[in-house]
Image: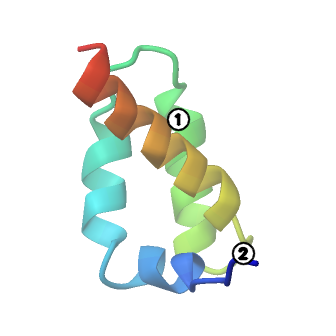
Amino acid sequence: MGFGVPVGDWFRGPLKELLMDTLGNSRTGYFNITTIDKLIDDHISRRADNAFQLWNLLMLELWYREYVN
């Protein structure tokens, strides 16, 4: 059985810059940047818990940069 990690808190703290820089400069061309910015803004300001969505988008972007681009 796995264990939970505080990704949501990390996105508001030590991973905030990575999240914003990576998703804000997406190379995939698949993301609507306005929507991504809203997801990030809502998460950072605690209006919504978008950690799951942001983690998946971040991993997809990093995978794309490593293996496709």
Residue 5, labelled with which disc?
Answer: none
For the residue marked with disc 1, what is the amino acid?
Thr
Q: Residues within 10 Å of mark 1 (few under 14, many from 20)?
A: few
How far from the left and from the top, in percent, is residue 22?
Answer: 29, 45
Q: Earlier in the sequence, mark 2 or mark 1?
A: 1
Residue of label 1: 34
Residue 47, labelled with which disc?
Answer: 2
For the residue marked with disc 2, what is the amino acid?
Arg
How far from the left and from the top, in percent, is residue 15?
Answer: 33, 72
Q: Check the image and report above or below for 5 versus 63.
A: below
Marks 2/1: CA–CA distance: 17 Å
Provide the secondary structure element on which disc 1 rests.
helix
How far from the left and from the top, in percent, is residue 49?
Answer: 72, 71
Image point (29%, 21%), residue name:
67
Residue 45 sits in quarter: bottom right
Image point (44%, 81%), residue name:
10
Q: Are marks 2 and 1 in contact (CB under 8 Å)?
A: no
Residue 18 sits in quarter: bottom left
Q: Check the image and report above or below for 44 versus 19.
A: below
Total labels: the figure holds 2
Image point (24%, 29%), residue name:
66
Image quarter of the C terminus: top left
Image point (45%, 45%), residue name:
59
